[in-house]
């Protein structure tokens, strides 16, 4: 039996529905986007296959549909679900606009700052129902941040959405990584005193990411696009705030943080991967990936894993998943230490 | 079964555990030392001044944390290839 009984159990059971929903929606977007010519080239394959893009839209649609269904069936906190849906929906719109219009690199972080505003606004209207400005710290207790906490919410959403957007260079890395993160945080929430809404949203994120991962895993048959990457990242950020798992979420996202930090510290500006003149990796004639020898290339996580050792794409993806398992385990320990 | 780059995973494990420990210590400093400080000189703006100073301290701590992370990764992964990866 789960810690707080029937409500938590029904939350998990309903969230499992998001797996088939996400699966069907991804399949739908694959067909529609293929017909409309919304495709991307898988540059890490010798055959350079054309893969349907923007199929990650299945995840925000699933999350919003299931959140609405959960509230309509009488479960969870309607304000929490509304805040979550608004954040995910607005980030998906920013991603979709970027996918279609190819915005400059600076616009994504700026526009995703706005995606955090629904949480701040609802928090002002319904104090203590949306977020709690007391940050819980492992071992050392907690501290109250009445001014800094709400101000940092838009920044947090922008950082989580863009850092998730940046760590999807290989087949399945984003969806698989987010699945591992969500699973770790879901277990942590279940162990440390669950609220049904938080359990439902983490389980929903896990199963909808898995539904998309089925088609996105190596070798990919569907690409996420910015619409999927930004909305999933925003979902992680929103859940960290709404579910009070801020520090554990930072720990779980260590691979993304490392990737983004090293990218930005080298390039020193917000830019798109497609705009880079020096690519961090290169494709060898035998189909393996190798670290770039170009001194101007950014030190991305994939490049770091390939230093001095060229590898197959599937091998690098598995290594990245191992890193997510490590960060997920550390996040779980963090949550236990906070309890 | 797909092989893992075990050397990279081991080194990254070391990096993540170190950064995790440093992060907890950093939050501990904020919770135990910085948060209880009272820096309110002007009663009208004191609350905001207090928050701004504490935010600056948190920012300095997080930049230091990222700097150590940067040095650690460069030391473990890019030391031998510094000539090709990082020209002076």
Image: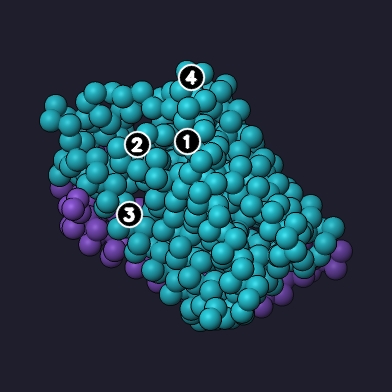
Chain colours: A cyan, B purple
Whether the residues at callouts 1 and 4 have beta carbons within 8 Å, the answer is no
Residue farthest along the left direction in this orientation: A286
- Rendered view: A219 above or below B44: above
Q: Tell me whether marks 2 and 4 sit on the same chain.
A: yes
Q: Tell me whether marks 2 and 3 sit on the same chain.
A: yes
Residue A290 pos. (x, y %): 20, 36
Residue A83 pos. (x, y %): 72, 53
Image quadrant containing the C terminus of chain A: bottom right
- Rendered view: A44 above or below B31: above
Mark toward the viewer: 2 or 4: 4
Q: Nearer the viewer, residue A137 or A29?
A: A29
Whether the residues at callouts 3 and 4 have beta carbons within 8 Å, the answer is no
* Mark 2 or 1, nearer chain start: 1
Determine the secondary structure under disc 1: helix
Write down the residue under mark 2: A220
Report if residue B84 is visible in the image: no
Mark toward the viewer: 3 or 1: 1
Mark identifier at residue A27: 1
Q: Chain of mark 1?
A: A
Determine the secondary structure under disc 4: helix
Determine the secondary structure under disc 2: loop
Whether the residues at callouts 3 and 1 have beta carbons within 8 Å, the answer is no
Mark 1, other Cα within 10 Å: few <14 / some 14–19 / many ≥20? some
Q: Chain of mark 3?
A: A
Write down the residue under mark 4: A35
Residue at figure coordinates x 52%, y 45% from the top left = A22
Write down the residue under mark 3: A321
Q: Tell me whether marks 3 and 4 sit on the same chain.
A: yes
Q: Disc 2 versus disc 4: distance between alpha carbons? A: 18 Å
* Mark 1 or 4, nearer chain start: 1
Q: Within the image, what quadrant is residue A114 found in?
A: top right
Residue B76 pos. (x, y %): 23, 55
């Amino acid at each position: 039996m789960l810690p707080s009984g029937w409500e938590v159990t029904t939350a998990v059971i309903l969230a499992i529905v998001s797996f088939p929903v996400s699966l069907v929606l991804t399949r739908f977007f694959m067909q529609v986007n293929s017909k409309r010519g919304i495709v991307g080239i898988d540059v890490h394959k010798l055959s350079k296959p054309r893969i349907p893009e923007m199929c990650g839209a299945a995840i925000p649609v699933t999350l919003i549909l299931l959140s609405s269904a959960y509230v309509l069936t009488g479960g969870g906190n309607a304000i929490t679900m509304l805040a979550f849906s608004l954040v995910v929906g607005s980030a998906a719109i920013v991603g979709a606009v970027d996918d279609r219009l190819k915005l400059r690199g600076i616009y994504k972080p700026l526009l995703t700052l706005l995606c955090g505003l629904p949480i701040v606004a609802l928090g002002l209207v319904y104090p203590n129902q949306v977020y709690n400005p007391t940050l819980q710290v492992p071992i050392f207790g907690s501290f109250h941040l009445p001014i800094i906490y709400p101000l940092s919410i838009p920044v947090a959403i922008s950082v989580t959405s863009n850092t998730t957007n940046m760590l999807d260079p290989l087949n399945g890395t984003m969806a698989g990584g987010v699945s591992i993160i969500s699973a770790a945080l879901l277990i942590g929430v279940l162990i440390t005193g669950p609220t049904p809404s938080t359990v439902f949203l983490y389980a929903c994120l896990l199963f909808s990411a898995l539904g998309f991962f089925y088609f996105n895993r190596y070798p990919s048959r569907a690409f996420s696009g910015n619409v999927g990457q930004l909305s999933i990242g925003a979902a992680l950020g929103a859940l960290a705030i709404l579910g009070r798992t801020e520090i554990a979420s930072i720990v779980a996202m260590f691979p993304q943080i490392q990737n983004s930090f090293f990218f930005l510290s080298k390039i020193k500006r917000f830019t798109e991967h497609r705009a880079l003149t020096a690519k961090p990796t290169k494709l060898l004639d035998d189909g393996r990936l190798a670290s770039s020898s170009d001194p101007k290339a950014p030190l991305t996580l994939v490049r770091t894993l390939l230093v001095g050792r060229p590898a197959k794409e599937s091998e690098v993806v598995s290594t990245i998943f191992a890193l997510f398992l490590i960060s997920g385990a550390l996040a779980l320990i963090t949550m236990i230490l906070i309890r | 079964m797909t092989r893992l780059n075990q050397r990279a995973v081991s080194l990254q494990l070391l990096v993540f555990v170190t950064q995790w420990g440093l992060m907890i210590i950093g939050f501990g400093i904020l919770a135990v030392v910085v948060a209880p400080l009272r820096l309110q000189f002007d009663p009208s703006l004191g609350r905001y001044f207090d928050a701004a100073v504490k935010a600056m301290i948190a920012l300095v701590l997080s930049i230091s944390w990222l700097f150590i992370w940067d040095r650690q990764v460069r030391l473990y992964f890019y030391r031998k290839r510094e000539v090709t990866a990082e020209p002076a």
